[in-house]
Image (cartoon, rainbow, N blue to C red):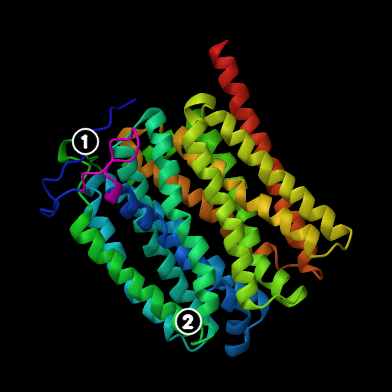
Amino acid sequence: MTTACPPDTTTAPAVAAPTSRVGRLGVPIGLVVVLGALQGIGPLSLDTYLPALPDIAHDLSASTSATQLTLTATLAGLAVGQLFFGPMSDRLGRRRPLIVGLAVYVVASLLCAVAPNIGLLIAGRTLQGFTAAAGMVSAMAIARDVSNGAAMARLFAALMLVTGAAPVIAPVLGGQLLLVTSWRGIFGLLAVAGVLLLLTATFRVPETLPVERRRVGGFGETVSTFRRLVRDPGFRTPLLAMVLSCAGLFGYLAGSPFLLQDVHGLSAQAYSALFAVNTIGLTGLSQLSGRIVHRTGPRVLLLAGTSICAVGGLGLLAATLAGAGLLAIVPALFLVVSGMGFVFPNATALALADHGDTAGSASALLGTGQFLAGAVAAPLVGLGPDASLTMAVVIAVVTVASVGAALSGSRRRELALA
């Protein structure tokens, strides 16, 4: 494994680094907060407008499935964008692709705010997701640059505390904004958030990839790097477990606004509050992971996280088949979401552990896998005569499959040690 180098600030602005530290990580708290905010730009873009999906469908005279495509478009943009910005960050350093991506993100958010029809909104959301990927992949690559081993798993758990605030705040903020503005105002707010992140990245993010460690080569080298990563079982297995778990999470994101608001009659504000509770569960488990990973190891926690998600998925399917109400559905959804608090940091740490020299590309594949899974799962949950049942089936199938992937990784590790 390539030893991580300390941050190289020679190409960064001359800004005094924070002196406080995060536990035993030796990483400034200010940098952790900034990296968490950059990772949070994806969830912020996805979740803030969720309470407004029914309003968008009404205002633009669009069907439910067409409106859900605005979510699918963002997920596809995030997936493709990471394939673009990840290798770029390995070749050009972390800062330049990040700053360019954030600048275009602001423009994309403004385009969404003024979109006159569902087609142009879908196009704007695609560009918004593509450019948000710059923040997410750069944040993971920088975190890998400045840490390794168990400290890296703890750092990713710490980032989840900051990143977890985005999906908690986003739907609540979106629901409250709908009291005073329309869904267009929500996209205006995302543009403002993009400006703030752009300024922060310009003046507070150091360059952590020295010139001598940057990769050379063009498209062929990028493809070769991706091929090597996918062929490595140590990378592929946690990637698969994360992808399948994320498919369940994004199935929840796409289907829950209609299930809970249209079917069960919750208001946009009640839905956003319930969404926040679920995400607090995710954040709580991510922090527990950071505290115990040095004792259990990340593989055990990855298996525990996928199992929690699967219990929730099977519970949701059982509740739907039985025609149960919110008292059965809400706890099941809570498990589907909160289990990701164990999945995200530990799958990421396992996948990146042996790939410090290609952290940008490896991070890109992790992110692409997550959002491609979401891009597939999101439209599926709206199909069929009973969308609630379709959503439950999709979430149950993919979360159970994620347990199989995690078990496969644990078994492979046992055989390697035998």
Let me know if residue 29 is in the magenta part: yes
Let me know if residue 137 is in the magenta part: no
In the picture provided, is 211 more to the left or to the right than 182?
left
**Magenta segment range?**
18-30
Which SS does the magenta portion mostly show?
A: loop
* Dot 2 amino acid type: Leu
Q: Are marks 2 and 1 in contact (CB under 8 Å)?
A: no
Indicate the secondary structure of the residue bearing disc 2: helix
- Seen from the viewer's position, the closer of residues 305 and 173 is 173
Query: Which x, y percent locates residue 57?
Result: 62, 83
Q: How far apart are marks 2 and 1 (CA)?
A: 44 Å
- Seen from the viewer's position, the closer of residues 87 and 395 is 395
**Total of numbered circles in the picture?**
2
Residue that badge 1 annotates: 6
* Dot 1 amino acid type: Pro
Q: How crowded is mark 1: few (under 14 residues within 10 Å), some or many (20 or more)?
A: few
The quadrant holding residue 211 is top left
Circle 2 or circle 1, nearest the eye? 1
Q: As displayed, is residue 53 above or below residue 232?
A: below
Residue that badge 2 annotates: 120
Quadrant containing the C terminus is top right
Quadrant containing the N terminus is top left
In the picture provided, is 242 more to the left or to the right than 258?
left
Q: Is residue 354 visible?
A: no
Q: As displayed, is residue 134 above or below residue 273?
A: above
Query: Which x, y percent locates residue 413?
Result: 56, 21
The disc placed on residue 319 is: none
